[in-house]
Image (cartoon, helix red, strand yellow):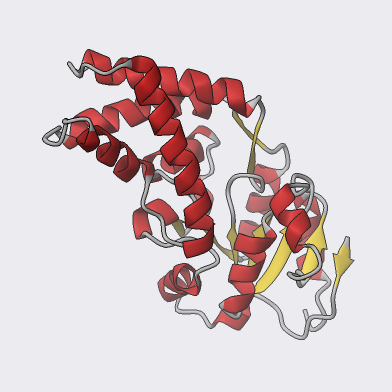
Amino acid sequence: MNVTNFSRVFDAIIFDLGGTLIFFDGEWPEILRQADQALFTSLESAGLRLDRERFLGHFRDEMEIYYRERDTEFIEHTTLHILREILKERGNDELPESVLRSALKAMYSVTQAYWMTELDSHAVLQDLSNQGYRLGMISNAGDDADVQVLVDKANLRGYFDFILTSAALGIRKPNPRIFEIGLEVWKLPAGRVAMVGDTLGADILGAQLSGLAGIWITRRADTPANRAHSHTILPDAEISILSELPELLMNYPGK
C-alpha cells in the first residue's frame, strides 16, 4: 500500500463499480458473441427481418467506434442510441422503445452472468458504513439498466446514498460534472470526499479534476489504458485490494 501525505480527512467515499467492487470472470470475445446472438434473437422474435451476420457485424463495428469516441469526448450516447440508429439505417425507424429495451435486456443478461462480487466488497462497505462514512457510486456504462441489475445481483444497493451512471446522465468520468452531481446530493465540499476506482483516466483523473482525492485500487488495473497513463496520472493513494481501504482512511494524517 502506497500512501502520499494527506492533509485532510473525508466524510464520504465514492466507488467505481466494475473492476473495483465487482469483476468480470470470463472471456470477453466469446461472451460478447453470445450476447450479440441473444440481442438478434430478441429482435427477430419481435418481428424484425434482418440479415443476422450483416446486422451483428454492423452492430459490433458501431459499438467499437462508440467505445473509442466516448473515451475521448466523455459523452455517453448509450447502447440504446447506437442500436436505434443502426435499425433506422435498415428501415426500422418506428420501433417501440420497449422492443429495443427488451433486446438490450436479452443481450446484457448474457454478460451479467459473468460479473462476480469481489470477496471483500461487502465487508469493507459495511465497515465504512459502521464508521459513519457516506457512500456513493459513479459508474461509466453504456446502459443504466445493466448497472442497476449488476448492483442488485451483487446486493450492493443498500450501502449507497446514490448510484450514478454515465448512461443516465449522458456524461462520463472524468468529466467533473458527474462528480459534482454526487457532491450536490451530499452537500459536501470536494475536499471531504475521496474516489476509489481502478481506472486512472476515468476514476483518478476525474476525481482530481473535481477536487476529490483519487485512491487507485490496482488488483485489476493492469490494462493498456492504465499503463499508458501510469506516468502522467498519479493517484493520491494506492491500495492493492479493497480490504486495505479502512486502514488507509484510518491512518490519514489528522484523523
Q: Looking at the rendering, in which quadrant would you find the C terminus? A: bottom right
State the residue at coordinates (80%, 75%).
252
**Left or right of 14 in this view: 36:** left
**Left or right of 7 in this view: 162:** left
**Left or right of 239 in this view: 177:** left
- Image height check: is 211 above or below 150? below
- Image height check: is 115 above or below 77? above
**Left or right of 75 in this view: 83:** left
Residue 254 is drawn in which quadrant? bottom right
State the residue at coordinates (69%, 53%).
225
Measuring from the top left, give residue 35's x and y in whole percent: 46, 23
The one nearer the camera, 184 or 81, is: 81
The one nearer the camera, 235 or 131, is: 235
Measuring from the top left, give residue 88's x and y in whole percent: 20, 37
From where the camera sits, is residue 122 visible?
A: yes
Measuring from the top left, give residue 44's x and y in whole percent: 25, 15
State the residue at coordinates (73%, 42%).
120
